[in-house]
């Protein structure tokens, strides 16, 4: 069982917005601004799309955005596109004892 | 080209050992914390271990005592020695680079190498 809780799936039509939540505790998400998000297409390596809660690496479309409130982080995909259909994972630093933990992943389906 | 290339995966019997390698190009591993992350078939990402530039090493609870991470700055590579393998260790193992800045995120991933533990 993953330490961070994500919905198993979300879906939306092209052009719509979807939001994926990532719920942790004060020991991980709530305790550090070190939440990152990864996109993974089938049989591919993960790709970082958000880091430090809200930062978007160069080359990542601005329709991807991140936020955090308390111990819950969120990833929003605005203007959903067909190529956004993938699995998405959140990740948080969790202190030197646990170090880091991932969410269970959310499958995004574009209808 | 900046990349990570894993090798060393394969089929091993329960209780056996395997050594994974990750060779970096386009950057020097000595400047980064380097991680192993695995993904069991059809499952999510699971952090395994980190080799920190200071020499510290950390492991997930499920592999502590069985896996050992090491780095070879001269060869610009790092490794994961896996002993006492069980079927639950079957997964694609990715090596990943941590961004060289305060925080924790993985800005570069290898293509993965499959480890299958089966009799």
Image (spheres, coloured by chain):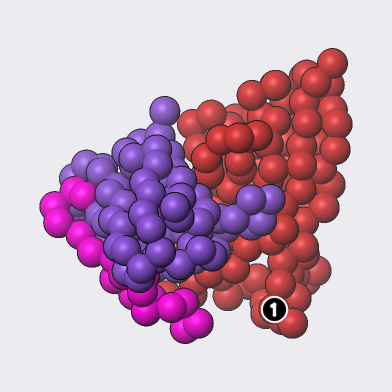
Q: Is residue A86 magenta?
A: no
Depicted B90 relative to depicted A60: above or below: above
View extreme (left): residue: A70
Residue in the foreground of this view, choosing between A71 and B71: A71
Depicted A29 relative to depicted B88: above or below: below
Q: Is residue B113 visible?
A: yes
Q: Position of residue A1 (x, y in %)?
A: 42, 28
Residue in the foreground of this view, choosing between A56 and A29: A56
* Residue hosting label 1: B2
Q: Is residue A15 left or right of residue B112?
A: left
Q: Position of residue A48 (x, y in %)?
A: 49, 66
Q: Quadrant of residue A64?
A: bottom left
Determine the main secondary structure of the stretch shown in magenta: loop
Residue in the foreground of this view, choosing between A75 and A35: A75
Magenta segment, which residues? A51-72
Q: Quadrant of residue A98?
A: top left
View extreme (top): residue: B119
Depicted B107 relative to depicted A68: above or below: below
Chain rendered purple: A
Question: Label 1 lies in what chain?
Answer: B
Q: Is residue A76 left or right of residue A81?
A: left
Q: Is residue A64 magenta?
A: yes
Q: How many marks?
A: 1
Chain rendered red: B
Q: Is residue A78 left or right of residue B4?
A: left
């Amino acid at each position: 069982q993953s330490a961070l809780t994500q919905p198993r799936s979300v879906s939306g039509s092209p052009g719509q917005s979807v939001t994926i939540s990532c719920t942790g505790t004060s020991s991980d998400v709530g305790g550090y601004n070190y939440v990152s998000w990864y996109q993974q297409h089938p049989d591919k390596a993960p790709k970082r799309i958000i880091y430090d809660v809200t930062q978007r690496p160069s080359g990542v479309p601005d329709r991807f955005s991140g936020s955090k409130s308390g111990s819950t982080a969120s990833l929003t995909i605005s203007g959903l596109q067909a190529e956004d259909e993938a699995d998405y994972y959140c990740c948080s630093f969790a202190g030197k004892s646990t170090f880091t933990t991932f969410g269970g992943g959310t499958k995004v389906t574009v209808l | 080209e900046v990349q990570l290339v894993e090798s060393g995966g394969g089929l091993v019997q329960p209780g056996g050992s395997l050594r994974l390698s990750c060779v970096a190009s386009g950057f020097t591993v000595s400047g980064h914390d380097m991680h192993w992350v695995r993904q069991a078939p059809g499952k999510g990402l699971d952090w395994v271990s980190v080799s920190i530039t200071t020499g510290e090493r950390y492991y997930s609870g499920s592999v502590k005592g069985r896996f050992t991470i090491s780095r070879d700055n001269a060869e610009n590579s790092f490794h994961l020695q896996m002993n006492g393998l069980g079927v639950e260790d079957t997964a694609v193992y990715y090596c990943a680079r941590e961004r060289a800045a305060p925080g924790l995120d993985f800005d570069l991933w290898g293509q993965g190498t499959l480890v299958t533990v089966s009799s």
